C-alpha cells in the first residue's frame, strides 16, 4: 500500500479535520479536504519518485564510487558500481568496517598508516580531498584511487562521512 492510500484511509477516519480554522463536519467538506490533501500528497509522491529515479541514474552511471560511512567506521551505503573498481559487491562492502584497516583486504599495506590518520581526521569532523592511495581488488590487482570526503552533521553531531573515490593511473 503506497503512502497516498495510507494517508487517505487515515483522513477518512477523521471527523475532526480543521480547514481555515473551522471544523469540517459534513461529508462533502470532508471529501473535498481529503481530495485536496490526496492530490497534494500524490504530487509530492511523484516528485519524490522522480528525484529517486534521477539519483539512481546518477549513482549507477558514474565512474565515481559514492560511500557513506558511520562514525564507528561501518559502511552505511556504497554505490553498486564499487564492484567495478574494488571487485567487491556493495553487500560485501557494507559488512566491512573501515576502522579495522590493519585487517582490511582492500587498503594496500604501504598506505594503511596514512589512511588511519585520515580516517581519524574524518571521524573528528575534518574534510579531505584528493587523497591518493593504493588499493587491492578482490582479485588481487593493485589500483590507485583518489578519495575526497566531507562529514555530515545532524544537530552538531557527526552523522555520516560522505565520500567519493575513483581510479587514477598508477
Image (spheres, helix red, strand yellow):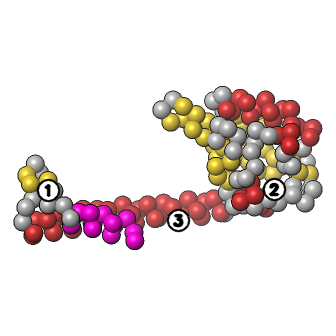
Callout 3 secondary element: helix
Residue 23: x and y, percent? 9, 54
- Residue 7, picture quadrant: bottom left
Q: How many marks are shown on the rendered structure?
A: 3
Q: Is residue 124 left or right of 118 when viewed as pictured?
A: left
- Asked whether the residues under the numbered discs 1 and 3 touch, taking CB atoms below 8 Å apart as contact, a structural biologist would say no
Callout 1 secondary element: loop
User: For the residues marked 1 and 3, what is the alpha-carbon distance in whole angstroms?
Assistant: 37 Å
Q: Is residue 53 left or right of 38 when viewed as pictured?
A: right
- Residue 124, picture quadrant: top right
- Residue 33, picture quadrant: bottom left
Residue 39: x and y, percent? 27, 66
First along the sequence among labels 2 and 3: 3
Callout 2 secondary element: helix
Query: Which residue appears at 71% of the width and 60% of the height?
Result: 91
Query: Which residue appears at 80% of the width and 40% of the height?
Result: 100
Query: Which residue appears at 23% of the width and 63% of the height?
Result: 11
The magenta stretch is 1-12
**Residue that numbered label 1 is attached to:** 16
The answer to if 26 sits in the magenta stretch is no
Is residue 130 shown to the viewer in this render? no
**Residue that numbered label 2 is attached to:** 86
Relative to 65, say whether 134 is above or below: above
Residue 22: x and y, percent? 7, 52
First along the sequence among labels 1 and 3: 1
User: For the residues marked 2 and 3, what is the alpha-carbon distance in whole angstroms?
Assistant: 25 Å
The answer to if 6 sits in the magenta stretch is yes
Amino acid at each position: 500500500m503506497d503512502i497516498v492510500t495510507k494517508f487517505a484511509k487515515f483522513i477518512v477516519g477523521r471527523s475532526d479535520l480543521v480547514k481555515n480554522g473551522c471544523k469540517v463536519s459534513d461529508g462533502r467538506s470532508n471529501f473535498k479536504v481529503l481530495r485536496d490533501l490526496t492530490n497534494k500528497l500524490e504530487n509530492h509522491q511523484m516528485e519524490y519518485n522522480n528525484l529517486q529515479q534521477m539519483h539512481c541514474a546518477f549513482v549507477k552511471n558514474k565512474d565515481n564510487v559514492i560511500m557513506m560511512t558511520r562514525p564507528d567506521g561501518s559502511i552505511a551505503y556504497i554505490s553498486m558500481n564499487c564492484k567495478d573498481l574494488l571487485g567487491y559487491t556493495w553487500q560485501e562492502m557494507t559488512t566491512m568496517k573501515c576502522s579495522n584497516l590493519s585487517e582490511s583486504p582492500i587498503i594496500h599495506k604501504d598506505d594503511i598508516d596514512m589512511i588511519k590518520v585520515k580516517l581519524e581526521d574524518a571521524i573528528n569532523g575534518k574534510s579531505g580531498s584528493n587523497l591518493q592511495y593504493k588499493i587491492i581488488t578482490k582479485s588481487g590487482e593493485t589500483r590507485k584511487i583518489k578519495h575526497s570526503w566531507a562529514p555530515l552533521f545532524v544537530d552538531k553531531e557527526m552523522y555520516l562521512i560522505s565520500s567519493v573515490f575513483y581510479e587514477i593511473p598508477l
